[in-house]
Image: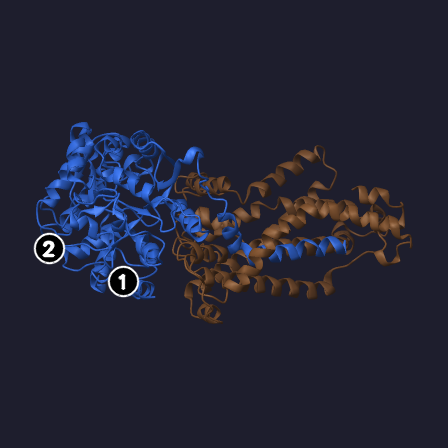
Amino acid sequence: MKKTVSTPIPRRYFLGGAITLAGLALSGCGGGSAPASGGAVELNFVFWGDANRAKVTEAALRVFEEKNPGITVKTEYQDSGPYADKLATRFAGGNPPDVLAMANRSLLEYAQRGTLADLKSLPELKLDAVPETVLSRGTVDGKLYGLATGVTTIGMVVNKTITDQAGVTIPDDKTWSWEDYAKFATEVTQKTGGKVYGAGFDVATETGPIMLARQRGEDFYTKDNKLGISEETMRDWFQYSVDLRAAGGYPPAGFFEQIGGSPAQSYLAKGTVASQIIPINNYRGYNDAVEGEVVLLRIPGETSGERRGYSADPTMLWSIAAKSKHPKEAAKLLDFLTNDSDGAAHTLTQRGVPINPEVAESITSKLSDDDKKFVDLMAAIQEDDLPAAYVYPKGASVVADTLKQLATEVEFGRVTPADAAKTFLEKSNAAINK
Amino acid sequence: MSVLTKQAPGPAVGAPLGEAPRRRPPRRKNQRSGYLFLLPWFLGMLFTIIPFFASLYLAFTDYNLFTEPNFVGLANFQAMFEDPRLLQSLKVTFIYTFVSVPISLATALLVALILNRGLQGLAIYRSVYYLPSLLGGSVAIVMLWRYIFGNDGIVNGFLGLFGIQGPAWVTDPEFALSTLIVLNVWTFGSPMVIFLAGLRQVPTMYYEAASIDGASKWRQFRSITLPLISPIIFFNLIMQLIGSFQTFTQGYVMSGGTGGPADSTLFYNLYLYQKGFTEFEMGYASAMAWLLLMIIAIFTAINFIASKFWVFYDN
């Protein structure tokens, strides 16, 4: 008996000690791209998203391969969470993909550690047609590390079938204020007898406070890559949801079990909330997933605030690994993804409005009605002069996690909005300045 | 197996190696086949040993996954003392361990005792109770758990029958950890099977003698069963403690990787993972891994020392 007692334990010690590095050791196994036969080049191309996104991307890549004999593209894709984890391990293991999708909030984490190629140094990638404002969102210290896959922004989607049935009029979204939205949401809850909550926007995603800060003349992330939102604005962001919950327009604490996920998994699709804030390139997905008619509206507060909050933001960014063995071919692929209308004919507005205006123009006739509404709203928003927006700083992913944590604390009344705002600034500044 | 069958039957099997008969060739042969059987384990150890020492080195560096690590001395360990999330993760892990391990061991022993009474179809019951412990750490079961305890889940549906509005088990920071503790207790199957094997080893003659002397069932349990299976309790305790300290999957899946709501399911290993792979502070994460190793070593050592006072070895 004694022997059985003691033998298994030392092995467990080792497991405990080495759990981190086990990941590192395994990372070496990640999709190694062995050179294909006949001198052909195989590019490894990774992105996050769902099966539909993968399908249209593959279709575009087949066009690329036809146009570029000798280059084949091998793709991998996951959900955004696991994607981020796998990407980190692959870079750490010295086996990064050639071309990859990068989240705004992760760009500088990678770029400032020298892991990404300067896209301006690759002549195969032509950037003449791309507006400077778009390039700036992937540029650090004069080097272009990320190129927008397309542009998008956030908007409000409302289930009009529900509000019509309840007899609630949707205010004019060109002029509505945050107060108007709160009133509207509360009325929806009342008139549906509490079956549907009027508002269901996500308090814990940074795009919300980013918008509010901009409307108040502050930059959530500033030009010099710092945190610029004031404690007061942050407090008001938290307070807004607390007040709206108290009034009945926003669901009770604990109601939202899953944040993010596909349109089909959303509370809007379940019919338990009447409105939600989404990245508007996903509008079609929501209208497809929801029974009834979903209308796409602007975010409240655009005319009642100090200045416009909107900006045309990269949906995500394309990057090329500094260690890519085939930078030329990788740049060709990026050029194709950015400037080729035949490829865009497949991907359409899947990753936002194409950043090359000619390409964007070329696909308009192929768009569905819902995608057209997205493109039209995007264009309408950009008709006015919008304040400049900047790259997310290093540490932005910690900021996002901190917001998530504090939003829950506020939701359950464990901290006041004022204390949450204070803590948010402290923790975020510490992460960014590290 | 063949090692055992080739040896002479009788007491020699259990005898310490030093007292084995001095016939060297067969012994060496036995050893050789023994090592042969261990070979896969030794090969597997390579994948553990190398990262093991690498992490020891990295614990003293500022390694960030992408650039060369720089030696920073004890800075990572010092930083731990000022890290509130580290304390939170320790708190979560300790609560989880010290609540769920005793309950799951007691449950396992109780069920094993019941099953040991010579039920018909024992093999079926044993499998049924064992099954959860094979599945408990799996992603699918934790997802299932989310639905069972979800707002529209079975648990709250059941409470609703009695007019009770159940809490938001998964999303409320006050309750999220308790649902995971329940999940862990539910996976009592593997200690149970070991208990069951142990109970079968207890010679029936002791019970016969005791019942002739008029000892009650409770008395028999306390004075015969418990002492004789105490080495097994000890073994299960150690294994469960170590397993609980290393909990990761449950917290990761339940919270979608965040350790939320509000860090209430931020297990130590989950935080370690976040540090390493989302904040890219792999040096710090390595240091955390070593702190966990030390914590587990200390608790195991305490147990071994304490075991002298309560574990009884029959032979």
- The residue nearer to you, when weighing B73 against B160, is B73
Is the residue marked by circle 1 packed among few (<14), some (14-19), or many (20+) residues within 10 Å? many
Label 2 belongs to which residue?
Answer: A307
- Residue A383 seen anywhere in this rendered image of the structure: yes
- Name the subunit of mark 1: A
Task: Name, please, the residue furthest toward the front.
Answer: A39
Is the residue marked by circle 2 packed among few (<14), some (14-19), or many (20+) residues within 10 Å? some
Q: Relative to A139, is A339 above or below?
A: above
Residue B145, image x, y percentages? 47, 42
Query: Which three-letter amino acid code belongs to the residue tagged 1?
Result: Ala
SS at circle 2: loop
Structural distance between the alpha carbons of marks 2 and 1: 22 Å
Does A268 sit left or right of B13 as displayed? left
- The residue nearer to you, when weighing A11 against A417, is A11
Residue A62, image x, y percentages? 33, 30
User: Disc number at residue A208?
Assistant: none
Does B49 sit left or right of A183 as displayed? right
Residue A117, image x, y percentages? 32, 51
Query: Which three-letter amino acid code belongs to the residue tagged 2?
Result: Arg
Q: Nearer the viewer, mark 2 or mark 1?
A: 2
Examine the image and state in which quarter residue A266 appears: top left
* Chain A rendering hue: blue
* Chain B rendering hue: brown
